[in-house]
Amino acid sequence: MPVRNGEWGRKKAQLIRAVIHLGFPGDLGEAAAEMLGSPRAMDRLIGYLNQARPKKIEQVADEILAIRMEIDKWRAKKESEEANRKINEMLWRGFEDDDSEE
């Protein structure tokens, strides 16, 4: 696993502190940080932990999965938009046929 520094490391530490503050193991914060992957996603989970103050570890896990699913859905949407853009460009410009000898 690559070492990440800067904002990512600060958010990870903040997430671990928030998880421990609620009485859950710090390993949960570690795993959540790796699974979420970005400071922005970790910030969302920290906000949830501070607002909802979940009592069960399952509630935290559900929120981690919900955030991860939203990230995956957003990425799939962006990939689809890019593919659609390329198809539309091909349709607009036409298909180039290298073997056209008429």
Image: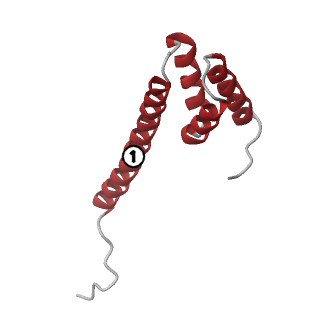
Q: Find residue 24 and report its horizontal and vertical position in percent.
A: 60, 24
Whether 22 is drawn above or below 8: the answer is above
Whether 95 is drawn above or below 23: the answer is below
Q: Which residue is most to the left?
A: 102
Q: Residue at x 49, y 12 (%)?
A: 52
Residue placed most toward the observer, 77 or 65? 65
Q: Residue at x 74, y 48 (%)?
A: 3
Residue placed most toward the observer, 30 or 90? 30
Kindly identify the amino acid type of the residue bearing the numbered disc 1.
Answer: Ala
Q: Is residue 5 left or right of residue 84?
A: right
Whether 82 is drawn above or below 40: the answer is below
Q: Secondary structure at mark 1?
A: helix
Pick the quarter of the image with the C terminus: bottom left
Count the numbered circles shown: 1
Tell me which corner region of the image, top left, top right, bottom left or bottom right, holds residue 9: top right
Q: Residue at x 37, y 54 (%)?
A: 83
Q: Find residue 99 and report its horizontal and vertical position in percent.
A: 30, 86
Q: Is residue 81 left or right of residue 51?
A: left
Circle 1 residues within 10 Å: few <14, some 14–19, many ≥20: few
Residue placed most toward the observer, 55 or 66? 55
Residue placed most toward the observer, 27 or 45? 27
Q: Which residue is label 1 attached to?
A: 76
Q: Residue at x 54, y 24 (%)?
A: 44
Q: Find residue 85 and report its horizontal and vertical position in percent.
A: 36, 51
Q: Which residue is most to the bottom?
A: 101
Q: Is residue 90 left or right of residue 50?
A: left
Q: How is the image coloured?
A: secondary structure
Q: Find residue 1 and report its horizontal and vertical position in percent.
A: 68, 53
